[in-house]
C-alpha cells in the first residue's frame, strides 16, 4: 500500500595532491554521503491527471538520522507552481524553485515534501543523501509524482515510487522504476555523481594548477 495513504495519506603540487586524494577516496557505497543526478521523462504525463506534484519522502531515523538535499531543479520547459503549494510533513522544507531538504530522527520517522509543477520535456535535479545505517529496518528515500488527487502515479516500484534508495549495511541501494498504464512513458535515469567533498577538492586543485600556469605566463 502507498505509504502516503497510510500517513494522511540527498599540474601543480596542490592539483596533484587533490587528484591523489580523489582517487583514494572511498566509493559511494562506503561514503558518508552519496550524490545522484536524476532525470525523469515527463513529456507524456496525461493532461487529464494534472495538476501534478513532485514528491519526496525520507523514512527512518533511529538510532542515527539521515538528511537529503535536493537542488539544481530543471523542468525542461515546464516550471514549479503553487498548485498544489509546497507542503511539508515532519522535518522537511524548501521550494522547488531553489532547494528542498528532508531529515529524519528518532522523533520524526515520516518526513515528506511535495509541490506542484507543470510538466516539460524532462524534469531533472540532484540529490545528496547521507548514509547512516539504521537497523533492523533501513532508512529509505523515495521520489514520486502525484496526480491531481495527490496519489502517486502508478509505477513498477514499491509504493508507486519512481526512485527508491534503501540505506542498508552502509550500501545505499538505488532503484528506479517506470510508470505503468497511461503513465508508461514516464521513465527515470539516476546517475551517480562524485562525492561533493571530492568535487570541491578537485576544483581547488585544478584552480591551483591554472593559477600556477597563469603566473608562469606573466613572468
Image (cartoon, rainbow, N blue to C red):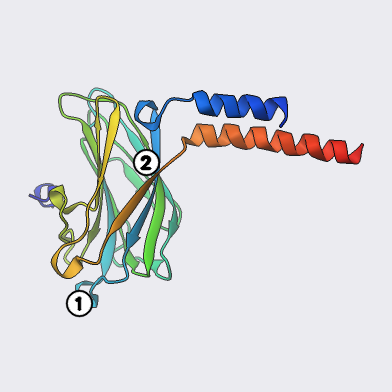
Residue with the most extreme bottom position: 48
Find disc 2 in the rendering and name its residue.
Answer: 10
> Crowdedness of circle 1 by 10 Å Cα count: few (<14), some, many (20+)?
few
Residue in the picture at 13% in, 67% down: 181
Label tally: 2
> Crowdedness of circle 2 by 10 Å Cα count: few (<14), some, many (20+)?
many
Find disc 1 in the rendering and name its residue.
Answer: 48
Q: Are dots 1 and 2 in contact, CB under 8 Å?
A: no
Residue in the picture at 16% in, 65% down: 149
In the rendered view, does 187 fall on the left or right side of 151? right
Identify the disc placed on residue 111: none
Residue in the picture at 65% in, 27% down: 16
Q: Earlier in the sequence, mark 1 or mark 2?
A: 2
Give x and y (percent) for residue 23.
52, 27
In the rendered view, does 107 fall on the left or right side of 76? left
Residue 154 lies in what quarter of the image?
Answer: bottom left
Tag 2, which secondary structure? loop
Residue with the most extreme right position: 219
Give x and y (percent) for residue 194.
47, 38
Residue in the picture at 49% in, 36% down: 196
In the rendered view, does 205 fall on the left or right side of 130? right
Residue 86 versus residue 206: which sits nearer the camera? 206
Residue with the most extreme left position: 1
- Determine the CA span between mark 1 and mark 2: 31 Å
Residue 27 lies in what quarter of the image?
Answer: top left
Is residue 34 at all visible to an observer of this figure?
yes
Is residue 8 at all visible to an observer of this figure?
no
Give x and y (percent) for residue 170.
29, 26
Give x and y (percent) for residue 13.
71, 25
Residue 61 lies in what quarter of the image?
Answer: top left
Amino acid at each position: 500500500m502507498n505509504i502516503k495513504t497510510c500517513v494522511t495519506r540527498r599540474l601543480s603540487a596542490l592539483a596533484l595532491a587533490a587528484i591523489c586524494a580523489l582517487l583514494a577516496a572511498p566509493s559511494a557505497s562506503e561514503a558518508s554521503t552519496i550524490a545522484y543526478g536524476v532525470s525523469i521523462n515527463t513529456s507524456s504525463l496525461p493532461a487529464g491527471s494534472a495538476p501534478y506534484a513532485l514528491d519526496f519522502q525520507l523514512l527512518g531515523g533511529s538510532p542515527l538520522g539521515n538528511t537529503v538535499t535536493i537542488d539544481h531543479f530543471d523542468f525542461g520547459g515546464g516550471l514549479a507552481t503553487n498548485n498544489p503549494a509546497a507542503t511539508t510533513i515532519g522535518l522537511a522544507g524548501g521550494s522547488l524553485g531553489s532547494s528542498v531538504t528532508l531529515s529524519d530522527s528518532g522523533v520524526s520517522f515520516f518526513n515528506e515534501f511535495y509541490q506542484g509543477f507543470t510538466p516539460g520535456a524532462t524534469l531533472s535535479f540532484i540529490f545528496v543523501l547521507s548514509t547512516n545505517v539504521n537497523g533492523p529496518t533501513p532508512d529509505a528515500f523515495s521520489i514520486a509524482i502525484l496526480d491531481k488527487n495527490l496519489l502517486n502515479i502508478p509505477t513498477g516500484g514499491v509504493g508507486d515510487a519512481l526512485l527508491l534508495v534503501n540505506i542498508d549495511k552502509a550500501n545505499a541501494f538505488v532503484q528506479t522504476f517506470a510508470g505503468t498504464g497511461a503513465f508508461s512513458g514516464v521513465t527515470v535515469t539516476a546517475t551517480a555523481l562524485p562525492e561533493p567533498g571530492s568535487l570541491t577538492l578537485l576544483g581547488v586543485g585544478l584552480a591551483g594548477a591554472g593559477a600556477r600556469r597563469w603566473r608562469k605566463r606573466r613572468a
